[in-house]
């Protein structure tokens, strides 16, 4: 009988290797990747049954990567394994279609169970957050904005340049990307942070010390 195929997405190699030893007795670990973009690529190439992913990763964070997978009709179950002990993250992850939410310090006792549950169509939430999630309604989730810690290093570069008043063309030239890519980055960041205008973006960056006062 074929073992379920797993991809691990985590930019901390030591964590990923620890997960390898935890999972390999029962599952087939087909690849370890270090960022959200590689996670999407591995899902498309390898068609794993389950992806175990961190939320905070370079290039694309885990939630953005999950959004891309769902838009591509990828059927892999995504379980987030994270240090974020916050019901906000769990609620957003589950709303986006995650099959599980496990805290890293509980991985040894919960992750295998979460994977097993996902393979039979169940959703696993770490008991540490289960009670807190009962308070989350869809309307409250819709108003929950992301946080600076959700941003990848590239997104921080983009947000700083736009907040400094640069045009999309100038941002693109500075970062050696296309104007369209710069605009797409800005749109995703503003959606993630719950911002509506460039003025909101400027004030947000000022409050969080991403840029200095004029």
Image: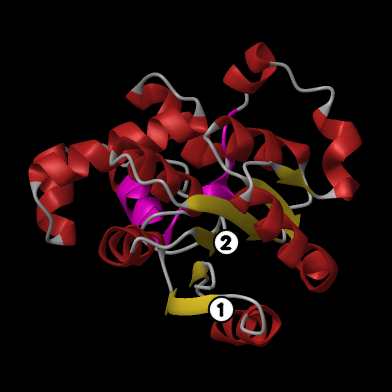
User: Does label 2 or label 1 sit earlier along the sequence?
Assistant: 1
Dividing the picture into quarters, in which one does residue 111 lie? bottom right
Tell which of 171 and 80 is nearer to you.
80
Dot 1: what SS?
Answer: loop
Asked whether 90 falls inside the magenta stretch, the response is no
* Left or right, residue 135 beside residue 201: right
Query: In which quadrant will I find the C terminus?
Result: top left
Q: Which residue is pictured at 64% across the width and 47% down the height?
A: 120
Dividing the picture into quarters, in which one does residue 92 lie? top right
Count up the numbered dots.
2
- Can residue 209 be seen in the rendering of this structure? no
Q: Which residue is pictured at 80% across the width and 62% down the height?
A: 110
Q: Which residue is mark 1?
A: 12
- Can residue 68 be seen in the rendering of this structure? yes
For the stretch drawn in magenta, what is the main secondary structure? helix
Label 1, residues with CA under 10 Å away: few <14, some 14-19, many ≥20: few
Give the extent of the magenta segment: 145-160
Label 2, residues with CA under 10 Å away: few <14, some 14-19, many ≥20: many
Q: Which residue is pictured at 42% across the width and 29% down the height?
A: 191
* Left or right, residue 2 beside residue 84: left
Residue 54 - label = 2
How far separated are the C-alphas under marks 2 and 1?
A: 9 Å
Dot 2: what SS?
Answer: loop
Q: Is residue 88 above or below residue 161?
A: above
């Amino acid at each position: 009988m074929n073992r379920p195929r797993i991809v691990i997405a985590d930019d901390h190699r030591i964590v990923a290797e620890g997960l390898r030893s935890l999972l390999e007795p029962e599952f087939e670990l087909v690849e370890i990747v270090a960022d959200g973009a590689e996670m999407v690529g591995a899902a498309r190439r390898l068609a794993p049954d389950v992806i175990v992913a961190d939320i905070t990763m370079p290039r694309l964070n885990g939630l953005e990567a999950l959004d891309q997978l769902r838009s591509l009709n990828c059927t892999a179950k995504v379980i987030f394994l994270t240090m974020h002990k916050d019901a906000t993250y769990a609620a957003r992850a589950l709303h986006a279609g995650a099959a599980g939410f496990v805290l890293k310090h509980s991985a040894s006792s919960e992750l295998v169970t979460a994977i097993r549950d996902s393979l039979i169509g169940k959703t696993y939430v770490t008991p540490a957050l289960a009670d807190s999630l009962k308070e989350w309604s869809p309307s409250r989730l819709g108003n929950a904005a992301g946080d600076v810690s959700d941003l990848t290093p590239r997104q921080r570069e983009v947000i700083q340049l736009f907040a400094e008043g640069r045009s999309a063309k100038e941002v693109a030239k500075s970062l050696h990307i296309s104007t369209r890519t710069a605009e797409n980055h800005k749109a995703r960041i503003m959606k993630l942070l719950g911002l509506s205008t460039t003025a909101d973006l400027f004030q947000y960056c000022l409050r969080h010390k991403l840029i200095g006062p004029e």
